[in-house]
């Protein structure tokens, strides 16, 4: 299959479809899109709608081998982009809507645009993880419902933009080294904690219909403002 893909790409090298055809046929594509990744390099946003139906702009990813992938007017199922770290990448963009943009590393592009604003950047590939975690973090977050210890919910919106509360995790007996999160989106709905430890989770609800599930038990759903508590999570 790889030989066939290479031959076809060489045949149409001068065509703007070369990069797209390569990605369709290659067994190991250098670029992938998702609405629920474990990590990513580029995140698209639309301030009007977190789960946008159309990101009104155009982006063009080109790798150091000359392969190109173009996206236009795409939905949030392509919100997160993961690129091959072994290649260098450039990204051209054009905004046709005022409040759209994207995030690369700690840099935000767009969000307050004029129609037709455009540019080209060399991508510094910094892999991002939900909740600001990293590969070595004892806590990981996901919007995928596989292998989780805690599930957060909002009865008003399954795909919530902001969970109206705060949570704090720490290993029992080591409260000084804690991990705190608040007002997070459903991208962090599922939490996985490092095994072989006993965890404490403190929580405060600032919204009536939010809560979480641990070990089959539901907490919250009919909260007073500022209602709080803690649970013990024994994974030892």
Image: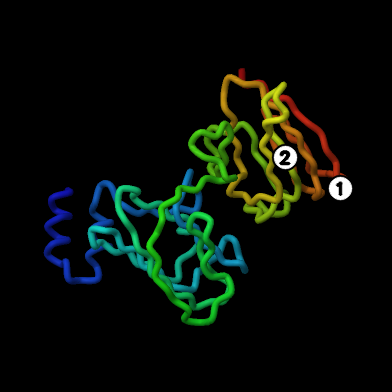
Q: Residue furthest top?
A: 236
User: Which residue sits at x=50%, y=63%?
Assistant: 102
Q: Residue at x 13, y 50 (%)?
A: 3
The quarter of the picture where the C terminus appears is top right
Q: Secondary structure at mark 2?
A: strand
208 or 102, which is in the foreground? 102
Q: Which mark is residue 71?
A: none
Q: Is residue 100 left or right of residue 19?
A: right
Residue 19 visible here = yes
Place of residue 86 in the rendered image (x, y in percent of width and height, measured from the top left): 30, 48
Look at the numbered discs 1 and 2 and tell me whether their residues touch, using CB distance below 8 Å: no
Q: In this rendering, is residue 184 above or below 72?
A: above
Question: Which quarter of the picture shows residue 176?
Answer: top right
Q: Position of residue 5 (x, y in %)?
A: 17, 55
The image shows residue 227 at horizontal and vertical percentages of: 85, 41
Reading the chain from its start, which is encountered first: label 1 or label 2? 2
Please give the label number shown on residue 225. Answer: 1
Q: Which residue is mark 2?
A: 167
């Amino acid at each position: 299959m790889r030989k066939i893909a290479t031959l076809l790409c060489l045949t149409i090298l001068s065509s703007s479809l070369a990069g797209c055809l390569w990605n369709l046929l290659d067994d190991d594509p250098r670029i992938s899109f998702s609405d629920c990744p474990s990590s990513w390099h580029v995140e698209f946003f639309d301030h009007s709608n977190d789960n946008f139906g159309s990101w009104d702009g155009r982006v063009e990813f080109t790798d150091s081998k000359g392969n190109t992938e173009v996206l236009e007017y795409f939905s949030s199922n392509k919100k997160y982009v993961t690129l091959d770290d072994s290649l260098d990448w450039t990204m051209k963009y054009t905004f046709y809507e005022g409040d759209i943009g994207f995030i690369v590393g700690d840099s935000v592009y767009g969000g307050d645009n004029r129609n037709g604003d455009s540019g080209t950047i060399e991508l510094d590939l910094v892999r991002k993880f939900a909740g600001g975690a990293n590969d070595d973090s004892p806590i990981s977050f996901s919007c995928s419902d596989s292998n989780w210890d805690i599930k957060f919910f909002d009865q008003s919106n399954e795909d919530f933009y902001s969970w109206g509360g705060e949570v704090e995790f720490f290993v029992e007996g080591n409260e000084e080294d804690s991990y705190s999160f608040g007002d997070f989106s459903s991208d962090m709905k599922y939490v996985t904690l490092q095994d072989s430890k006993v965890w404490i989770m403190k929580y405060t609800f600032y919204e009536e219909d939010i809560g979480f599930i641990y070990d089959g038990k539901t907490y919250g759903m009919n909260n007073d403002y500022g209602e709080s508590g803690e649970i013990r999570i024994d994974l030892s």
